[in-house]
Image (cartoon, rainbow, N blue to C red):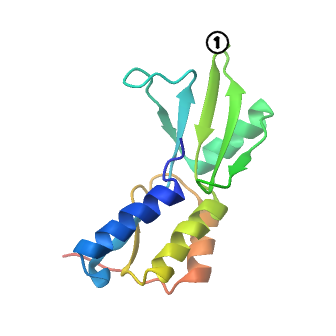
Amino acid sequence: MAVAPLPSVRRVLDYALTEIPADKIFLGIPNYGYNWKLPYERGVTAAVTLGNLTAVDLAIETGSEIIFDELSQSPYFYYTDAEGAARVVWFEDVRSLREKFELVSEKAIRGCGYWNLMRPFPQNFLLLNSMFNIIKVYNG
């Protein structure tokens, strides 16, 4: 499934707003994807994490069509690996991130923060900068 399906993110945020003041909530934004071997077996199958640009590169290398799931508001694709195993990759792109960023404004929460900045994804920051005023915060 998607890394952060929009209906699930919305449901968690709606619940959080019943317990926590909006000005204390930051929405976690994923900066990664998951590469799953198929068929998925709960408790057995483990995903490999990868960056969003790496996911796109992999789709290009394998000639895979990137599909956008309208329900989860997330991109994914299928491919067959070198050992002949079927795989599915779910990741984030500017379309999926735009939906999450719009929740920040819609719900009037404090802002958003990233779970992982170690993987480059410049399109993300262009989108973020076009939608919000960016501030730098230091703790210490």
* Residue 29 visible within the image: no
**Image coordinates for residue 75, horizontal then vertical, percent:** 65, 49
**Image coordinates for residue 120, horizontal then vertical, percent:** 55, 55
Q: Nearer the viewer, residue 122 or 37?
A: 37
**Quarter where residue 117 is shown:** bottom left
Q: Is residue 110 above or below residue 99?
A: below
Identified at 36% across, 81% down, the residue is 110
Q: Secondary structure at mark 1?
A: loop
Disc 1: which residue:
83
Identified at 41% across, 55% down, the residue is 116
The C terminus: image quadrant: bottom left
* Residue 120 visible within the image: yes
Q: Is residue 85 above or below residue 134?
A: above
Q: Nearer the viewer, residue 21 or 83?
A: 21
Q: Is residue 19 left or right of residue 8?
A: left
Identified at 62% across, 57% down, the residue is 73
The three-letter amino acid code for the residue at tag 1 is Glu
Identified at 63% across, 42% down, the residue is 55
**Quarter where residue 98 is shown:** bottom right
Q: Is residue 27 above or below residue 74?
A: below
